[in-house]
Image: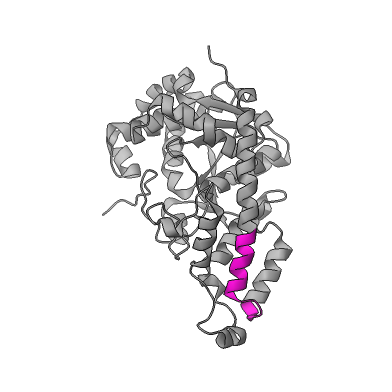
Amino acid sequence: MKHKIIDPWGSELLESYEKIIKDFGLEIFNPKLFPKPNRIMRRGVVFAGRDLKIISDAIKHKKKFYVLSGIMPTNEKIHFGTKMVVENIKYFQDHGAETYILVADLEAASTRGVTLNEARKRALDFHIPAYVALGLNPKKTNFYFQSENRDVMNNAYEFAKKITVNEFKAIYGSADPGKIMGAITQVADILYPQFKERKPGIIPVGVDQDPHIRLTRDVVKRFKERRFFLPSSIYHKYTPSLDGDLKMSKSKPESCIELPEDIASVNRKIKRALSGGRDTLEEHRKLGAIIEKDMVFELMKQHLVEDDKELNKIYKKYKSGKMTSGELKQIACDKMEKFMGNFVKGVEQARKHINRLNFVKFK
């Protein structure tokens, strides 16, 4: 029997989110668990998680918990999946979580061939400022580089003693040394806030990163004497490709929007995107749009329209045929231009204050 695999380093598309929930034992996300759920929680973009009630209870009873995520500093731009991760980090940060952002420079070196110096430069010049521009509160965030955190490195070697090659292959599909080192270091990162004080923690990620969560939870169960909390996790769906595929991919540049990107290029892509409009205007006015097929409406739902009432108004007009696909795309272009402009300005502003960030000091 072939093992079911999600590859956090690959580009394989998922068959369906429902199948992933079933195959990997995830919980269906219930936005009612959390106070004032954010846009992607309310709209079903966040779709699953693990051990979410313990985080819900921590928020409700104002108990200590943490939220942690990592930056993989391998590219000069980011994508909308990163935006959703930051939005979920911000949600938990705003609800009392101690916040940690690690720069995965060791993993970048072992799995992507990026030098530690280059990883540091990319993180400071762009990735960390981008997270701040997307809403992360830098005054309430603890940052660190994997390569400087001896606690993470020492514990990674300790954890490695309880993981077998066969287990690693079952989770990840292969077990080359670079992937093993990268994954075990991530286990230590996920648990790092608990090294000094035992407390629940939540890791917001795309579902392709679930293997790291599962490996960490296995490690916790094997180190019962350390009394770690099992890490909780929360997963968002991919932002679909503008041509209708499940996930935007840089391998198809005309259907993928990067952050940042020249607005003229973005507008051209939006206007060429797969539409839910009918073949003729007469047919569209009569039957209305097939919204489920419309990638621009999905982009607006996930990212560009914050207000639910505004989105519902657009939905009704488009669904009824009163709004054409061309009009919908123009609204999206206008909103994208505003978003992209604010993002670029935010990155530039955050870059000026990079030296004021709270980097964990190591002995």
User: Considering only vertical position in the picture, is 36 above or below 162?
Assistant: below
* Residue located 36% across and 27% down the image: 160
User: Considering only vertical position in the picture, is 331 above or below 64?
Assistant: below
Is residue 192 found left or right of 132 in the rendered image?
Answer: left
* Residue located 66% across and 37% down the image: 93
Where does the image place residue 17, in percent across and percent down from the top left?
47, 59
User: Considering only vertical position in the picture, is 200 above or below 157?
Assistant: below
User: Considering only vertical position in the picture, is 331 above or below 90?
Assistant: below
Q: Does residue 201 show up?
A: no
Where does the image place residue 70, in percent across and percent down from the top left?
50, 35
Give the quarter of the figure containing the N terminus: bottom left
Is residue 12 found left or right of 348 in the rendered image?
Answer: left
Q: Nearer the viewer, residue 13 or 52?
A: 13
Q: Nearer the viewer, residue 236 or 254?
A: 254
* Residue located 44% across and 44% down the image: 209
Is residue 196 found left or right of 305 in the rendered image?
Answer: left
Where does the image place residue 81, in percent across and percent down from the top left?
51, 49
Q: Does residue 62 show up?
A: yes
* Residue located 53% across and 81% down the image: 278
Q: Nearer the viewer, residue 170 or 11?
A: 11
- Magenta stretch: helix, strand or loop mostly: helix
Where does the image place residue 173, in percent across and percent down from the top left?
30, 45
Q: Which coloring applies here?
A: one colour
- Is 97 a magenta residue? no
- Is 333 a magenta residue? yes
Q: Nearer the viewer, residue 262 or 133?
A: 262
Report the magenta residues as a range: 319-334
Residue 163's quadrant in the figure? Answer: top left
